[in-house]
Image (cartoon, rainbow, N blue to C red):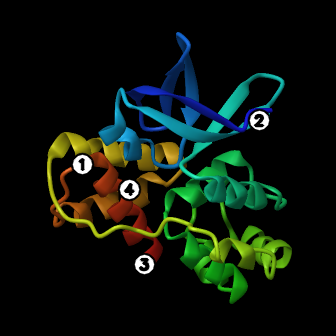
């Protein structure tokens, strides 16, 4: 089992990044691959979780050990697989997520792709009272955002679809994003995720 990798980000797609280490490129799935846009070809550490299936060996990547811990707790819940866990992690208001679980706010939780009422209730049932220690850790909060460029917006929309959001949700958010002034794909994606959670 891998704990982390140190290497250079050499490629970014809507669903994953490629990190090169010792001449090997590792495909690592992330909630927001475009977070790493400003870190291309720099050496960095990414925490990993490996999932081995009959048809694939998959790596999931996280910026911090705290993010990895939260992901592992999410996927321990029946009905939450790695893809759903990543989609939940992509919205970086992790404190808001923990508070929603602690206050039994199922309405907040069903906004995530792949999370229906039953799964939201299961999340609350399984994790309520078990995430408080993560609130004391340094979970990253949303940074303020502003700015615009069409290729970055298109990449952000593709990333939303890769996370499992429906075409209807993506189109609705697209209209709102046209009013924003974002400079990077990462910023567009953060704003989009925030908008989805507000509606």
Q: Quadrant of residue 4?
A: top right
Secondary structure of residue under mark 4: helix
The circle drawn on residue 198 is 3
Q: In the rendered structure, which disc, 4 or 3, sits on the residue that comes first in sequence?
A: 4
On the question of residue 199 being in view, the answer is: no
Secondary structure of residue under mark 2: strand
* Residue sitting nearer the eye, 24 or 166: 24
Q: CA distance from mark 3 to mark 2?
A: 32 Å
* Residue sitting nearer the eye, 143 or 52: 143
Q: Residues within 10 Å of mark 1 (few under 14, many from 20)?
A: many
Mark 3 or 2, which is nearer the eye?
2
Q: Residues within 10 Å of mark 4 (few under 14, many from 20)?
A: many
Q: Classify the position of the N terminus by image quarter.
A: top right
Could you say where residue 86 lies in the image, as x and y percent from the top left? 60, 51
The circle drawn on residue 51 is 2
Q: CA distance from mark 1 to mark 2?
A: 30 Å
Instruction: Look at mark 4 in the image and give the residue it sits on.
Output: 170
Q: Classify the position of the C terminus by image quarter.
A: bottom left
Give the residue displayed 73% in from the left and 79% down from the top: 132
Q: Quadrant of residue 100?
A: bottom right
Secondary structure of residue under mark 1: loop
Cβ atoms under marks 3 and 1 closer than 8 Å: no
């Amino acid at each position: 089992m891998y704990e982390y990798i140190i290497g250079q980000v050499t490629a970014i797609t809507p669903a994953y990044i490629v990190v090169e280490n010792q001449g090997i490129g590792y495909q690592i799935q992330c909630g927001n691959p475009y977070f790493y846009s400003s870190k291309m070809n720099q050496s960095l550490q990414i925490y990993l979780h490996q999932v081995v299936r009959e048809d694939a060996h998959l790596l999931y990547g996280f910026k911090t050990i705290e993010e990895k811990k939260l992901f592992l707790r999410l996927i321990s819940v029946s009905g939450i697989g790695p893809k759903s866990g990543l989609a939940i992690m992509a919205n970086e208001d992790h404190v808001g997520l923990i508070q929603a679980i602690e206050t039994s706010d199922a309405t907040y939780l069903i906004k995530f792709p792949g999370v229906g009422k039953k799964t939201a209730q299961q999340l609350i049932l399984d994790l309520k009272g078990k995430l408080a220690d993560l609130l004391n850790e340094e979970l990253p909060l949303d940074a303020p955002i502003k700015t615009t460029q069409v290729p970055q917006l298109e990449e952000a929309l593709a990333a939303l679809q890769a996370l499992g959001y429906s075409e209807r949700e993506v189109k609705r958010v697209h209209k709102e994003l046209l009013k924003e002034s974002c400079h990077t794909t990462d910023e567009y994606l953060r704003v989009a995720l925030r908008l989805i959670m507000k509606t």
